[in-house]
Amino acid sequence: MGEDDRVPRIRGASIEEHHEMVWAALAEALRQLLLERDYDSINMGHIAARAGLARNTLYNYAHDKSALVLALTRRAGRPAVERVTEVAARSAEPAADRMREIIEVVLESFRDRTMQLVFRPGSGAPVAEGPDKPFHAIVVAVEDVVRDGIARGEFRDVGDVHLVVELLSGVMRAGAERIGRDPAAFAATVRAAREIVLASLARGQG
């Protein structure tokens, strides 16, 4: 029996736990491989071997590398999505304070090398419209905070909130890519992103 014909072993106490453990192993395998080689040179066989899986088993989780990376980035981004949603919902707090925290939460998530893959060529913009995009829920939450800030008089009336948030997402992308290139620049990048975003929303700006 060849390696790819092996019967998969259940790693956890239940099927659900098993799947979670496999996904965690796949994420760690990809992180390790990205430290060793260029993304384009990594194939499904490399990922399966590093995760300790038979290649055929890996195809039960994703039909190709692009689908696997999309699934992994969604999972890696899930804590940030949940945290941003929670922060945005704290309506008793000033909108500017919530925006500051959201910026840090989002940029923090990009310290994970897996998350940097959302910027690879051909992956599509991570904040593009559509619930299938990893950061769609974050965009919706940020739009809500901007609208709340406008209604309270904290932020200027920017007109098209969706357009403004889409444009500001470019600032966040630049920050995330900078952190990917230079992790030590995290604090300075968060500080600069906050200044740019909040200045663009401040009353008195035209």
Image: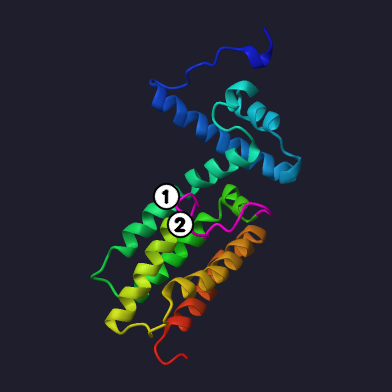
Residue 54 visible, this orientation: no
Over which residues does the magenta segment extend? Answer: 120-135
Residue type marked 1: Pro
Principal secondary structure, stretch drawn in magenta: loop
Task: Find residue 97 and report its image quarter.
Answer: bottom left
Kind of element beneath mark 1:
helix
Q: CA distance from mark 2 to mark 1?
A: 14 Å
Residue type marked 2: His
Residue 136 tag number: 2
Residue 72 visible, this orientation: yes
Q: Relative to 78, is 71 on the left or the right? A: right
Residue 4 tag number: none
Q: Residue furthest left?
A: 92
Residue at the spot of label 1: 79
Residue 182, percent across and down?
A: 65, 61
Q: Residue at horizontal 67%, vertical 52%? A: 122
Q: Residue at horizontal 69%, vertical 11%? A: 2
Q: Residue furthest top?
A: 1
User: Along the line of sight, which residue is nearer the eye, 97 or 152?
Assistant: 152
Q: Is residue 27 above or below residue 163?
A: above
Residue 106, percent across and down?
A: 48, 60
Q: Is residue 47 above or below residue 127?
A: above
Q: How busy is the neighbourhood of tag 2: few (under 14 within 10 Å), some, or many (20 plus)?
A: some
Q: Residue at horizontal 50%, vertical 55%? A: 109
Circle nearer the N terminus (2, 1): 1
* The N terminus lies in quadrant: top right
Q: Is residue 118 above or below residue 145?
A: above
User: Along the line of sight, which residue is nearer the eye, 37 or 71?
Assistant: 71
Residue 115, percent across and down?
A: 57, 51
